[in-house]
Image (cartoon, rainbow, N blue to C red):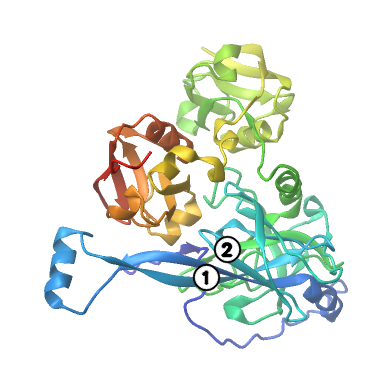
Amino acid sequence: MRTRSFALTFALPLAVVIAAVSPRPTRGIASVPESFASVAKAARPVVVNIFSTRVVRVPGSTGDPVEDFFRQFFGPGLPYRAQRQQSLGSGFIISSDGYVVTNAHVIALAQQIRVRLSTREEYEARVVGVDQKTDIALLKIRPKSPLPVAKLGDSDALEVGDWVVAVGNPFGLASTVTAGIVSAKDRVIGAGPYDDFIQTDASINPGNSGGPLLNLRGEVVGINSAIFSRSGGSIGIGFAIPINLAKKVIDELREHGRVIRGWLGVSIQDVTSDMTESFGLDRPRGALVVEVEPGSPAARAGIRRGDVIVEFNGVPIEESRQLSARIAELPVGRTVSVLLLRDGKERSLQVTIGESPEETIQETSRSAARTWGLVLTDLTPQLASRFRIPRGVRGAFIREILPGSPADRSGLQVGDVIRQVDRTPVNSAAACERALASAGDSVLLLVQRRQVSGYELLQREADEP
């Protein structure tokens, strides 16, 4: 029996594929547009090409078969060389003075970013802020004159069956326009903790990432982000981040350079149908508390492991991801009500929202990791897919290795994931930073590289801090 497998694709193009696009047949329905020309004409000037360049360390090779044999069986003890890699994506302009929105995975690990306008003008871009959890990045360029600006619409007003238009640069083909319908809303595809995607059959391909999805009024209603595909090309299942979610993230990035999210301090999961009776529920609903972090807002409020949160701030909770989104959107310091079930009985508590510890440490200011020559970020589903990290692996993703550092002298590579520091598990970049801060002159790391894990020892030299 032949099984078919599908992959969630965020990767950028490896080859150019030319495909004929057949016009959508009309069926005599009055609401079917005769043409999308007006939408395309309005959108194309605000859509940009984004080129990102990064330098990676790859095994150097002289072509000697003996060298290749030793590298294969004894690991990366031989010299490495620097190699430049370029990625391609799309974006759109949101202000006349040069703010540009794109996907975080489009500029992941980039050391240089260039933006090309529809007029073929090119500008170097700086990163204003990145939010890995929603896969959104905000860039800034310095244009010579005011730029045309995209109109942001209301993604909540979209209905399944509405016509939408995608504009971007698939496979480097600038200003490509495709059309389709909204196939579904509120899709969860495992891309991050705040999954809430618009599904569309408008053709979206590698290189479209970061470009706009528009309604027939020419308003941006989504950010094209991912496709399901066996081949890497479009099969009519594409996903876009709703613009209403993106607006909040963009505003935070523009004001603070990061997204400040509320925090409760609980690990949660859905209540399955076979659990309902055990927790005194009439049907599967609510968010089951699996773990409460000591000293967290949840712990201070009296929330315990095994509680089922069924209402939060007056809003019924049907599933765990709904609670995560509600917590994240609340301002730090807000006190809200929580209705939960414990031993089959309802209890009402008050909890004061804290700030997520993961958001309080920015990548650029993490000094302990840098003393070892490491620039870290959280491992996201997009990075795990791109670097072939197995499912279930958690840790700190190495996005850059500083030249001449202990990490540079070791066998570590960009794309490795640090899972343990001196035998202590680390599940995030922030946790890894804290562990490295308390290390001595040497530190033992458990590292995941694609499908293989192994230990790596970093050692400081006498003149290093």
In this view of the protein, which residue sits in the foreground, 449 or 99? 99
The relative height of residue 183 versus residue 313 in the rendered view (above or below) is below
Q: Earlier in the sequence, mark 1 or mark 2?
A: 1
Picture quarter containing residue 43?
Answer: bottom right
User: Which quarter of the figure is the C terminus placed in?
Assistant: top left
User: Residue 222 location, x and y as percent?
Assistant: 72, 59
User: Which quarter of the figure is the N terminus placed in?
Assistant: bottom left
SS class, disc 1: loop
Disc 2 marks which amino acid?
A: Val
**Residue 369 can be seen, yes or no:** yes
In-image side of 243 versus 238 (left or right): right
Disc 1 marks which amino acid?
A: Leu
In-image side of 166 versus 382 (left or right): right
Give the residue furthest to the front: 463
In-image side of 188 versus 383 (left or right): right
Per the image, the residue denoted by label 1 is 12
The relative height of residue 239 versus residue 443 in the rendered view (above or below) is below
What residue lies at 36% left-to-right and 64% top-to-bottom?
Answer: 57
SS class, disc 2: helix
Per the image, the residue denoted by label 2 is 106
Q: Residues within 10 Å of mark 1 (few under 14, many from 20)?
A: many
What residue lies at 64% left-to-right and 74% top-to-bottom?
Answer: 203
The relative height of residue 401 versus residue 68 in the rendered view (above or below) is above
User: Residue 48 location, x and y as percent?
Assistant: 71, 72
In this view of the protein, which residue sits in the foreground, 429 or 222? 429
Q: Are marks 1 and 2 in contact (CB under 8 Å)?
A: yes
Marks 1 and 2, how far apart at CA = 8 Å
What residue lies at 73% left-to-right and 43% top-to-bottom?
Answer: 252
User: Residue 290 location, x and y as percent?
Assistant: 46, 25
In-image side of 128 versus 64 (left or right): right
In this view of the protein, which residue sits in the foreground, 140 or 46? 140
